[in-house]
Amino acid sequence: MIGDAPRSPHTRVPGWLENDEENAIVENARAIPEYGLAINIGVEYGRSMSDFVKYMPATAKVYGVDIAPLEAYTKNLLEAKLDPPPLIPGNSADPDTLKLVKKLIKTRSIDLLFIDGDHSYNGTLADLNIWTPLVKVGGKLLIHDVAVGPSPEHPTHVPHELHHDVRRAIDVWKSQSGDNWQVVKAVHTLLILERIH
Ligand SMILES: C[S@@+](CC[C@H](N)C(=O)[O-])C[C@H]1O[C@@H](n2cnc3c(N)ncnc32)[C@H](O)[C@@H]1O
C-alpha cells in the first residue's frame, strides 16, 4: 500500500528503500556524466526515479521500465516538482521490451543500470543477462534487495527469502560473466558493481 511506504528524505516520493540505500543511489546519480544514460527497472511509486531526475545532470536521461500500470508515479513526481521521465511498459525479461528501449536509446550504452523489478531467481537472472551487456565499461550496476548478512550497521537484519533468490541469481550471472564486473560495495541490501571490462 502506497500509504504505508516511507517517503524519501530527498524528494518526499514514497517507496521501499532504506535511507542509506537511497543515499547511495543519490551518490551514483550525481556521478552520471553529462549527457549520460540511466535505466531504472522497477519503478512503482517513483522513489528511485525521483532521485535520478533530481540528482543526475540535467543533460542526462533516465528511462523507467515497469510491468504494471503505474498510476501514482506521474502524480508523485509532479508533486515533487520533478518532470516524470518516460516509462517503457512491459516485462523487463521480454526481448520485446529491450527492443522498445533500444528504439529510444539507439546505440548508446548505459552509465547506470538500476535493477529493482522482478525479485525471483529467474527474473533477476534474466534482467542481468539481458540488460547488463548494455552497460559501458566504467558504468555502474545497482541491484536492490540482495541478501546480505547482519552487518554492524544493521545487526538484526535477516534477509527476506526473495533476497536470497536475487543473491543466487547474481552469483550465477557473475560466475558466467568472467571478470567483467567488480563489486564496489553493498549498502544494506543494495549491491553496487562496476563494469571493468
Ligand atoms: C520494489 S518495486 C520498485 C521500487 C522502486 N525502484 C522505488 O525506488 O520505489 C518493484 C517494481 O517492479 C515491477 N516489476 C516486477 N516484475 C517486473 C518485470 N518482470 N518487469 C518489469 N517490472 C517488473 C513491479 O511492477 C514494481 O512496480
Image: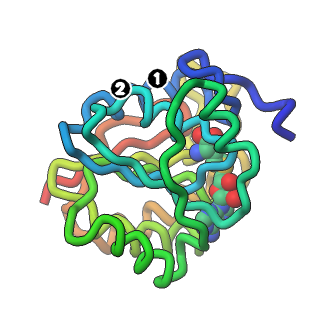
Q: Is residue 170 left or right of residue 66?
A: left
Q: Which residue is mark 2?
A: 27
Q: Quadrant of the N terminus?
A: top right
Tell me what residue is drawn at x 66 percent, y 27 percent: 79
Tell me what residue is drawn at x 51 percent, y 28 percent: 22
Mark 2 Cα shell of 10 Å, populated few (<14), some (14-19), many (≥20): some
Front-lying residue, 176 or 39: 39
Q: Is residue 121 visible?
A: no
Front-lying residue, 58 or 127: 58
Residue 9: where, in percent of width, then height? 59, 16
Q: Which residue is mark 1?
A: 23
Q: Is residue 153 left or right of residue 107?
A: right
Residue 184: where, in percent of width, then height? 29, 39
Tell me what residue is drawn at x 42 percent, y 67 percent: 128
- Classify 90 as above or below 5: below
Q: Quadrant of residue 174?
A: bottom left
Q: According to the image, what is the colour scheme of the structure?
A: rainbow
Q: Quadrant of ligand 1?
A: bottom right
Mark 1: secondary structure = helix
Residue 5: where, in percent of width, then height? 78, 31
Q: Is residue 151 left or right of residue 182?
A: right
Amino acid marked by disc 2: Glu
Q: Quadrant of the C terminus?
A: bottom left
Amino acid marked by disc 1: Asn
Mark 2: secondary structure = helix
Tell me what residue is drawn at x 36 percent, y 35 percent: 185
Say if mark 1 contacts mark 2, CB within 8 Å. Answer: yes
Counting labels gives 2
State how far apart marks 1 and 2 are (Cα): 6 Å
